[in-house]
Amino acid sequence: MGAASGKRSSNTQLAVGSLMVLGLLVVGIGAPLLAPFDPLKAVADSFGAPFTPQPPFLFGTDEIGRDVLSRLIFGARLSLTIAVAATSITVLIGVLVGVSAGYFGGRIDSLLMRGTDVVLCFPLLLLAIALAAISEPGMTTVLVVIGLVGWTGVARTVRAEVLSLKEREFVLAAKAMGASSWRVVSAHILPNVLRTVAVMAALSTCNTLLLDAGLSFLGLGIPAPAPSWGRMLSDSEAYYRVAPWLMIFPGLAIVYAVVASNLLGYGLAAASERSSTS
């Protein structure tokens, strides 16, 4: 009964997470059709005195008259773009480091893992802030910074998987038949770590979203007037008493995206574990 209950719980996590992520994708991709106003232009005469949520501004307006709902919708597109691109960089670096360290071992493993430990010594956000502060703000900077600081977890997990896989019979048989290292890795190692990589990618997306929001909040992310959720939170600081919706709505959007990626990641992890033990 306990196993059945755990299976139902993980299935629920996966289903709910998938639906939440799908909803986020629909909003991001369909932003030009769903947003009622241009997110960059003032559409209301509310300079310095944001409008409360009211028709036609369902989520109110900000301090210079821009529609908050439209900015949130286009912010979803921006966050998704950063999440997908930065997570891809993170996973690529992590897989390269993890596979190389785990498969070749010896000095290569020692060198790569010590480098990983050095990166892990620094809090991710502080390291990201330091890197972003010495670069020109922009999309490329955000992607590179997040990619450079977020790969360590993927690398360590993939390395552990590779250390186990390289001792399996099918890998030893391929080596005995004279297969090159590239052939063994590409044909036998990588296909067997794809499930783990998919899980780590989903979980890494959560960190990517939080890092992006944190950098934008500190003014080190995508520069204004881009509708970044983190920057919307930062801009709302001066109005949190008189216009709390400027803080609440982007905060809820960030929470939604993080919960969605977490549910999807843990649901995939549970499904992967069940399939590997069956």
Image: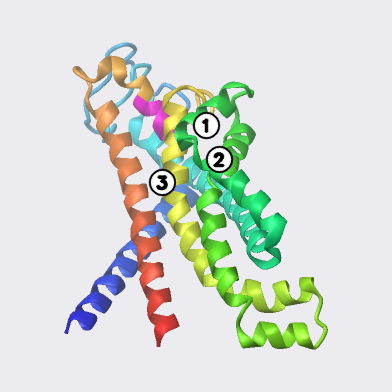
Look at mark 3 in the image and give the residue it sits on.
34
x and y percent of residue 4 in the render? 22, 83
Q: In the rendered structure, which disc, 3 or 1, sits on the residue that comes first in sequence?
A: 3
Q: Dots 2 and 3: beta carbons under 8 Å?
A: no
Residue 37 in sight here: no
Q: CA distance from mark 1 to mark 2?
A: 8 Å
Residue 127, disc: 1
Mark 3 residue type: Leu
User: In the picture, residue 211 is in which quadrant?
Assistant: top left
Residue 109 or residue 14, whichever sits in front: 109
Mark 2 residue type: Val
Residue depth check, mark 1 versus mark 2: number of the one nearer the observer: 2
The answer to whether residue 191 is left or right of residue 210 is right
Q: In the rendered structure, which disc, 1 or 2, sits on the residue that comes first in sequence?
A: 2
The answer to whether residue 235 is left or right of residue 244 is right
Look at mark 2 in the image and give the residue it sits on.
119
Q: CA distance from mark 2 to mark 3?
A: 41 Å
Q: Which residues are magenta?
A: 226-233
Mark 1 residue type: Leu
x and y percent of residue 26 in the render? 43, 55
In the rendered image, the quadrant that contains the N terminus is bottom left
Toward the front, the furthest residue is 106
Q: Dots 1 and 2: beta carbons under 8 Å?
A: yes
Toward the top, the furthest residue is 48
